[in-house]
Image: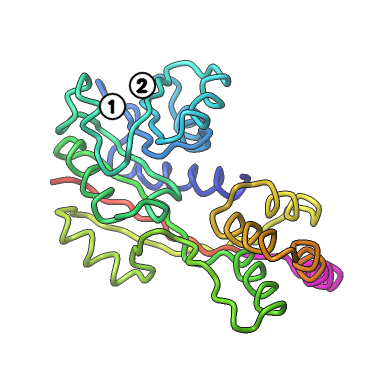
Amino acid sequence: MKTTAKAALRLIQELETLKPLSIANGIVLDNGCGTGATAMAVRYQSADIPILATDISPGMLDILDKREIPGIRTRVADALDLSVLEEDGVDNHFSHVLSTFMIQFTPDATKAVAEMYRVLQPGGAFGLATWIEVEIVTKINEAGKALEPQWKAPNMFASNWPTTVSEVQVKMEELGFVDIHTNVTRADLDSPLELLLDYTYNGNHPSAVEQIRYWEEQGRLKDFKAVYERSLGNLYAKGHRLSLRYMLTTARKP
């Protein structure tokens, strides 16, 4: 979560170079908000701008609602079809649209970005954070392969989104954006080993959930945990920390 929050704050700071959050009559859409890391980062940067936070999961929104952050409304919405927001005018409504680490878990990432483009005002600013590599997923998959060499690891993401700067540039231009800027960031996880293990087993990460279900069905979950925990334990004993690589993209709607 610390990595997500830091990435969200950095994305918002870069977004403000295109369109400040302090503008009159601005309104932010945080699409795929989860439990609110990005919405809270927006509020940290601007005490006043209204925020609409949407997610397909009512449970995620319940957690955000309980935070009782001033000026944040929540709404259940599918990122592939934002017409549910019709009372907000939908088309060309938002001055800023943000989405952090969400689109790759949708069935169609390109359609999700096209929907965000549709609801963004002309001249509005768009910010996107996407995963490139998550080392903890690599280690989960390696543990599975150690138990069953022919086992095929599940795809981490439901849909493909470009993972190189040049490909993202082309994709964003195809969708109509201008003033596109991308950068790739690497971050080391500073979480203790116990927290990483808890995240793997209880964090509902798609790759971990599918693997744990598989090994439970095979009656080998205990074996999987032993291999996985030994692998991470050896890395931590050597001072290694798992890393993440993600891309931040900002752009403007002409």
Look at the picture and state if 93 lies above or below 235.
above
**Mark on residue 50?**
2
Q: Find residue 224 and report its horizontal and vertical position in percent.
A: 75, 67
Q: Amino acid at mark 1?
A: Ile
Q: Residue furthest bottom?
A: 149
Residue 231: in magenta span: yes
Q: Residue at x 57, y 58 (%)?
A: 210
Is residue 117 found left or right of 5 in the rendered image? left
Q: Residue at x 66, y 72 (%)?
A: 144
**Mark on residue 23?**
1
Q: Locate residue 12: give its quadrant.
A: top left
Of labels 1 and 2, earlier in sequence is 1
Q: Amino acid at mark 2?
A: Pro
Q: Which residues are magenta?
A: 230-243
Is residue 111 found left or right of 130 in the rendered image? left
Closest to the observer, 14 or 194 = 194
Is residue 148 found left or right of 117 in the rendered image? right
